[in-house]
Image (spheres, helix red, strand yellow):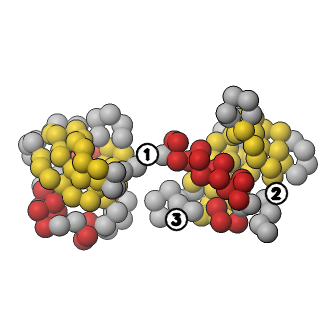
Amino acid sequence: MPHAPFQLHRDAYGRLVLTAENGERHEGVTPVRAFPIAAPDAGISLVSFEGHEVGWADRLADLPDDIRRLVEEDLAAREFVPEIERIAAVSSFACPSTWQVVTDRGATELILKGEEDIRRLSQTRLLIADANGVQFLVRDLTRLDAPSRKLLDRFL
């Protein structure tokens, strides 16, 4: 059975509380992925509300089930990064422009304020920030259909 060098539970207010092996308690901790895009299940830091790391897990799978569930619930509540599967239409090739996209969470639209809001994470991976602060992921440019790539190329 996996073992963690800490215990984790929710307090009456729903905040995560970490208790270290030495008995030290840290209230209001936040799980943070070290590599959220490249390796989302590896390198999970538990950070106190003061911003100090108070716990670490090499892999989510290494945590006991009850602790892993708490960490995954908290991460899911804070992370919302829909993945763009297709770009259906773009209102204009000048910014700001409204994009009609199909994501892994359904069809939606995003407003691109400027080309600088498209950030290249790797040769084939992009992160697009819309005007409302939502981050959209293009996991692999080569897997987009040709019309989507053609629209996107106008902004890269």
Q: How many marks?
A: 3
Of pointers 2 and 3, the one earlier in the residue sequence: 2
Work out how far the residue at label 1 is from the one at label 2, CA to CA, in angstroms. Answer: 29 Å
Q: How many residues crowd around disc 1 within 10 Å: few (fewer than 14), some, or many (20 or more)? A: few
Q: Is residue 88 above or below residue 145?
A: above
Amino acid carrying mark 2 in the image: Pro
**Residue 95, how many percent across, how many down?**
15, 39
Single out the residue that lies furthest toward the right.
Answer: 22
Report helix, strand or loop for mark 2: loop
Q: Is residue 97 above or below residue 64?
A: above
For the residue pair 43 and 71, the one nearer the viewer reads as 71
Amino acid carrying mark 1 in the image: Phe
Of pointers 1 and 2, the one earlier in the residue sequence: 2
Residues at badges 3 and 1 in contact (C-beta under 8 Å)? no
Single out the residue that lies furthest toward the top.
Answer: 13
Report helix, strand or loop for mark 3: loop
Q: Which residue is mark 1?
A: 80
Q: Which residue is mark 3?
A: 39
Residue at 81% from the left image edge and 52% from the top image edge? 6
Whether residue 153 is visible: no
Residue at 22% from the left image edge and 42% from the top image edge? 109
Residue at 31% from the left image edge and 59% from the top image edge? 138
In this picture, residue 150 sits left or right of residue 123: left
For the residue pair 38 and 15, the one nearer the viewer reads as 15
